[in-house]
Image: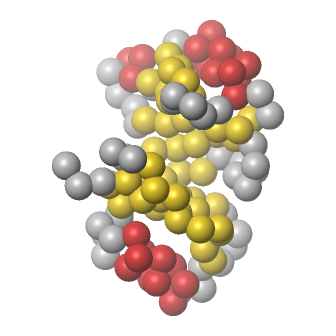
Amino acid sequence: MGASVSWFEIPAADPQRLAAFYKAAFGWSAEQYPGMDYFLLDTQANGSGIGGAITKRGPLQAPATTLYVESIDAAIATVRANGGTILGETITVPQVGTYAYAADPEGNVFGMLQQAAA
């Protein structure tokens, strides 16, 4: 099973304040996701970069990358079979996909996203 890095998340006590910081420091734009304390970041200031977001600090305590996976269930099973840990339940975001946080054997947190069917 292959996976590519597609996204990053930065946790913050005050996501709106941190979004303003990244806008001022790096020219990134931030748009609040409706109904959530979650700010989508556009990092394409120089024509390159991956997408990301700033989220309310909670289970996620440090920046994390997200990997696109073909099957969230298969990815979860593979992570567990290789000594990783799944953190919490899967999350389904309408029109985005199904997401799960995991930790590798060293405790580094990452996300996995099975994109919603088009």
Residue at 37% x, 54% y is 97
Counting from the top left corner in percent of width and height, residue 116 is at 30, 54
Q: Is residue 88 left or right of residue 59?
A: left
Q: Is residue 90 left or right of residue 113?
A: right
Counting from the top left corner in percent of width and height, residue 110 is at 57, 59
Extreme-left residue of the structure: 118
Counting from the top left corner in percent of width and height, residue 96 is at 37, 46
Count the numbered circles shown: 0
Residue 49 appears in the figure: yes
Q: Is residue 31 left or right of residue 22?
A: left
Q: Is residue 91 left or right of residue 6?
A: right
| Snapshot colouring | secondary structure
Q: Give the answer, above or below, for where 80 lies relative to 22.
A: below
Q: Give the answer, above or below, for where 93 lies relative to 38.
A: below
Q: Give the answer, above or below, for where 51 lies relative to 114.
A: above
Residue 86 falls in which quadrant of the image? bottom right
Counting from the top left corner in percent of width and height, residue 11 is at 70, 40
Residue at 52% x, 13% y is 27
Residue 51 falls in which quadrant of the image? top left
Residue at 29% x, 67% y is 70
Residue at 60% x, 79% y is 84
Extreme-bottom residue of the structure: 81
Residue 6 appears in the figure: no
Is residue 95 or residue 69 the one in the foreground?
A: 95
Quadrant of the snapshot with the N terminus: bottom left
Is residue 5 or residue 97 the one in the foreground?
A: 97
Is residue 40 or residue 45 the one in the foreground?
A: 40
Residue 115 falls in which quadrant of the image? bottom left
